Image: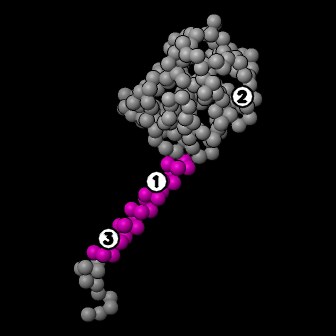
Amino acid sequence: MGEGKRTAAQALKLDLYTWLQALTAALLLLVALFTFVGRVVGVEGISMEPTLRDGDTILLRSLGYTPAQGDVVVLTKPFGTVSGPIVKRVVAVAGQRVQIDYDSGTVSVDGAVLEEPYLDSPMRWPAGTTETLTDLTVPEGSVFVMGDNREHSADSRDERLGPVDVRYILGKAEWILLPAGHFGPIG
């Protein structure tokens, strides 16, 4: 038998080895993409309604992301009974002063009342005793986040969470992937 000829078993081994290399490379690429570029996250709870609903699947952008006021973000800072990734809207960034007025149902940043067309209902006085943060300047390297469903959102108003260090942010929520009827960019 000549050196140029392979047996069927050798050819099969070479094919399997090639496929295994391709599969390993694809898996490493996916891990790198989801670690550094973006990831897919499920929404749990109603704190971001009507923008996002319980059970939505969203796509995050992580690479090169710097939080900005108005962005919807996913963060991982555990507090109270909350332990998994949570989705909130950035209301203010480092250096901005946040003032919450429950009597008028408004949030002001640097003295200007925010226009919040994404809210379904006005904000009311909280029932909880830990939602005490109503006037503060966001520390350097942090953001102040709130849910769009203010009546049912554990967020930066809660002294147990407070302003969130940006290192806890996984990324910006860019797209709703599922369910198909809710597919589209997140505003």
- Give residue 3's quadrant in the image: bottom left
Q: Residue at x 51, y 54 (%)?
A: 32
Residue 108 location, x and y as percent?
A: 69, 16
What are the residue bounds of the magenta stretch? 12-37
Q: Is residue 74 visible?
A: no
Secondary structure of residue under mark 2 = loop
Q: Can residue 93 be seen in this view?
A: yes
> Crowding at label 3, few (<14), some or many (≥20) Cα neighbours within 10 Å?
few
User: Total label count?
Assistant: 3
> Quick check: marks 3 and 2 in contact, CB under 8 Å?
no
> Which label sits on residue 138?
2
Which residue was labeled with disc 1?
30
Q: Is mark 3 on a helix, strand or loop?
A: helix
- Rate crowding at label 1 as few (under 14), some (14 to 19) or many (20 or more) other CA atoms within 10 Å: some
Residue at image position (63%, 7%) is: 104
Any magenta on residue 33?
Answer: yes
Q: How far apart are the alpha carbons under marks 2 and 1?
A: 35 Å
Specify the quadrant of the image occupied by residue 140.
Answer: top right
Name the amino acid, label 2. Answer: Val
Image color mode: one colour
Q: Is residue 56 left or right of residue 13?
A: right
Q: Residue at 43% of width from left, 57% of height from top?
A: 27
Residue 12 lies, with reference to residue 82, above or below; the image says below
